[in-house]
Image (tube, rainbow, N blue to C red):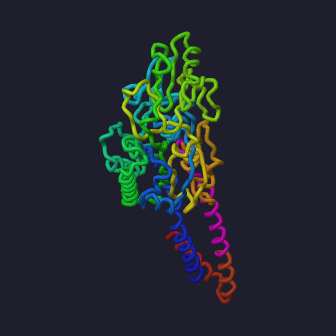
Amino acid sequence: MMLGLLLRGGLGLLVLLWSFIPPLVSLRDLAERPKLLLVSFDGFRWDYVNRVPTPNFHILMEEGVTVEQVENVYITKTLPNHYSLVTGLYAETHGIVANDMFDPVLNRSFSMDTDSLYESQWWEQAVPLWVTIQNSGGRSAAAMWPGSDVKIHGMFPTRYLPYNASVGFETRVEHIVKWFSAPEQEAVDFGVLYWEEPDDSGHDFGPESSLMDAVIADVDEKLGFLRNELKKAGLYERVNLVVTSDHGMTQLFADKIIELDQYVSRDLYTWVDKSPVVGILPKEGKLDEVYEKLADANPYMAVHLKDAIPERLHYRHNVRIMPILLEAREGWTIVQNRSTPHMLGNHGYDNTLRSMQPIFLARGPAFRQNYVKPAMRSVDLYPLMCHILAIPPLPNNGSFSNVRDLLHPEPTVSPPSIPTPAGLVRPSYFPVVVGSFLGLMLVVGFLMVFVQQVTLKQLPSLKHASREMSQPLLQEDLHL
């Protein structure tokens, strides 16, 4: 009787201990990927965060990591940099070399202001992260991110909003949060979220205008809205949140204008893209003449033949880069004549200029807390995101080793993964669980043998008949 009770108690202890294991290794957890949301506030310069009170940005700094200096890609414009963030490639490699382009092979022009923006052929020199994660068995979501409503390599994001500038930030956030918090079989693993400010206002007012203070404060409030929505959905501690931008902004001046009509006839070339970096396509046989007329035309304008563009810019090796490249010095504007509307702020200049560089903050289960890193490159974000999402990165210009220190020293992402029949990469917890269970069973078995021996030694007066009576009781107990 005593032995049976002891064994029943041991079995009960085993069941009790095992009851604590399923929350750690449930099938849901085995199937669930790490979550990551990438947010871009267009044109949010690195120093805006300290210009006016921005409590939500500063909370992220305390809760996560900050990078003081991010070198983005040349040219420092919206489409090239947003595509670099999700491919880890320089513009010359991913092919979106400007907001306005000409491809001599396709004999087609591209502009972010026309329907050419939605033609797949412009985007397929690279593979964005939402396509990669879907090819790995995961799901993605996009709210207005440049290029995310284009069918690239036969795919849209799993969930996405077609671009519509009139859709408010709050609506975009509500969609993203809904897609992340959907039932497990439908929830997305990776999302991208875009907002046009403070870029629009930076062009209109200039970054040094006092009118920008209210714009920056409003962006901070929008970040607060995003944080609150993630908390309400129970996602704030589960989703890795990266907040950054594509570029900064610099002040322009009405007296710092370079007029090309003063130096070269329009009949000799085609103008591609807009200031401050302008592609010049000379008419056939006119390359040398156009270059000679522009090379020393203005001390505030650098003129490069394509093959002589500085290597550090990584902006030579693509047919969409024009034979001659004009680059204005910071604060200067290149126009054909002064009839062009004048902006008070602009970007697109050399990516080593501090004014062109964006903010970078991140927080979540993968990231360290209250950690400040001096510098990184924007292309390094791609391999970092792939690591967090536990998917293999495609070839890229970034380096995970450059940003590894942003992550917790202890592993916080999925351990080595094994493929499932459905193609879903799941964490390989199985060996750990089996090993732990066998170890526990070994201990319990040892205790059972030990208790049995002790009990038998303390029952010398029992005859064989008594032992035979105890045996059916033991078997019956074990079947309960």
Q: Quadrant of the N terminus?
A: bottom right
Q: Residue at x 51, y 67 (%)?
A: 19
Which one is in front, 433 or 129?
129
- Spot the residue most to the front: 255
Which quarter of the picture shows residue 336? top left
Q: Is residue 290 left or right of residue 145?
A: right
Residue located at (47% from left, 43% from top): 250
Above or below, 28 against 136 in this view is below
Count of numbered circles on the image: 0
| Residue 72 magenta | no
Question: Magenta stretch?
Answer: 421-447
Residue 410 position by quadrant = bottom right
Does 446 lie within the magenta span? Answer: yes
The answer to whether one can see residue 418 in this image is no
- SS assignment for the magenta stretch, majority: helix
Residue 335 percent across, percent down from the top left: 44, 27
Question: Horizontal and vertical percent for residue 343?
Answer: 39, 37
Would you say 74 lies left or right of 180 here? Answer: right
Q: Is residue 355 above or below residue 124?
A: below
Q: Is any part of residue 410 visible from this angle?
A: yes
Percent of width and height locating residue 166:
30, 41
Vertical comparison of 436 with 291: above or below: below
